[in-house]
Amino acid sequence: MREHLDAIAARNPEIGAFRIIRTEQAVAEAQAVQEREDLTRLPLAGVPVAVKDNIPVAGEATRNGSAATSSEPAAADHPVVARLRAAGAVVVGITNVPELCLVAFGDSVYGTARNPWRRDRTPGGSSSGSAAAVAAGLVPLATGSDGLGSLRIPAACCGVLAIKPGPGLVPPPGEDWFGLTENGPLATTAADLALALAIMSDDMALATAYKTGERARVAWEPQSGVSGAVPVPSPRAWRSEPFELRIAIAPRPLPPALGVKVDPEFVRAVAEAGETLRVAGHTVVEQEPKLPARLGFATVLTWLRCAAHDARGLDRRRLERRTRALARAGRALGAVGLHGREEFERWRAHGADQWFGDADVLITPTLAAPPPPAARWGRAGWRVRWRSTSATPR
């Protein structure tokens, strides 16, 4: 573990993935895992994990990327962290995020996270440092959260995997953006992602569901006390009769009214993914309807409302210029009754089902354009413009 932490310390300055590297604490935690009586049954025994700086880790301050938040150490772990530790994981550090996790960049007063593939580019956000840490091989697993793309965007920017769970599966962060935000894992393989999701959700049946489409109960469950080992996911462990899906592809899901064009390379990637799945035996069709333009406008209104909500009670003098501008806009729009709530409620009630139609899976681009430069965008206020908008509504 110490050698692993030394490697993180050596590489982190060029990537900026971590706000805190918990060297001594992680070594002590790894030793404690080594001494556990259930060591051989732990699915994440000694595995180093990184935690996004928006959920509590006992003994560490949760700064949420801001100098305006409390510096008091957390008294207890968030349930997600507690579940990872119960499974044997060791928290090696807290990852960088933009202030209050408001934007799809990786800069804050604590540093600028960079994309390991091109360090002059952003890793996306707001799970910026988590995605960078996984992509750089500093950790195999990291936690993130996603309200309007904050897991999906950095995963796409950094070439790793992430999943935003549905509501109620994984305990959300404290600031959940009016029910939009969910915690989820980042990893480099589907097997690791599924295992992390299973542990974070406290439902180990999810550990192998990605292979068969079925949730088969497995032995290790942290709250049940049932002994036994979690079967290690293997690419050879497919069931004898593959399951078939109806898959819709939407290479250009955004309506023209939004004025955002999807990069041709991303359009081709969606088409190629669809063809690969068709050859594998699935039914693949192209999704004709575009996302409703009003949903895009509602998304912006909701985003600004969240900025105003999350900035409340904080010392504005210690907030970055960008955050102050976003919160000010959110307060102004809220004062005249513009908040986007009704459109999101319509989307949740029936709009999403209508757009998916009879498809089991819908494939879209995650980004509209390649990642922009890694810079201190937080000082720029409203001058920041990024066409790389998440093409998914939630």
Image (cartoon, rainbow, N blue to C red):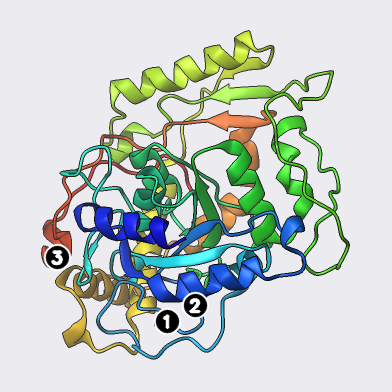
Secondary element at tag 3: helix
**Furthest residue in direction top, as rendered:** 279
**Residue 56 marker:** 2
Label 1 Cα crowd, 10 Å radius (few <14 / some 14-19 / many 20+)? some
Q: Which residue was labeled with disc 3?
A: 381
Q: Quadrant of residue 128?
A: bottom left
Out of 373 and 205, give the one closest to the viewer.
205
Q: Indicate left or right for 64 with 168 as reference.
A: left
Q: Where residue 379 sits in the image (x, y, percent)?
A: 12, 66
Q: Where residue 35 sits in the image (x, y, percent)?
A: 67, 70
Identified at 63% across, 39% down, the residue is 191
Tell me the mark number nearer the camera, choosing from 2 and 3: 2
Identified at 70% across, 28% down, the residue is 358
Tell me the mark number nearer the camera, choosing from 1 and 2: 1
Q: Are marks 2 and 3 in contact (CB under 8 Å)?
A: no
Secondary element at tag 1: loop
Amino acid marked by disc 3: Gly
Q: Is residue 114 above or below residue 86?
A: above
Whether residue 169 appears in this view of the structure is no
Q: Which residue was labeled with disc 1?
A: 60
Report how far apart the C-alphas of labels 1 and 2 lie in the structure: 7 Å
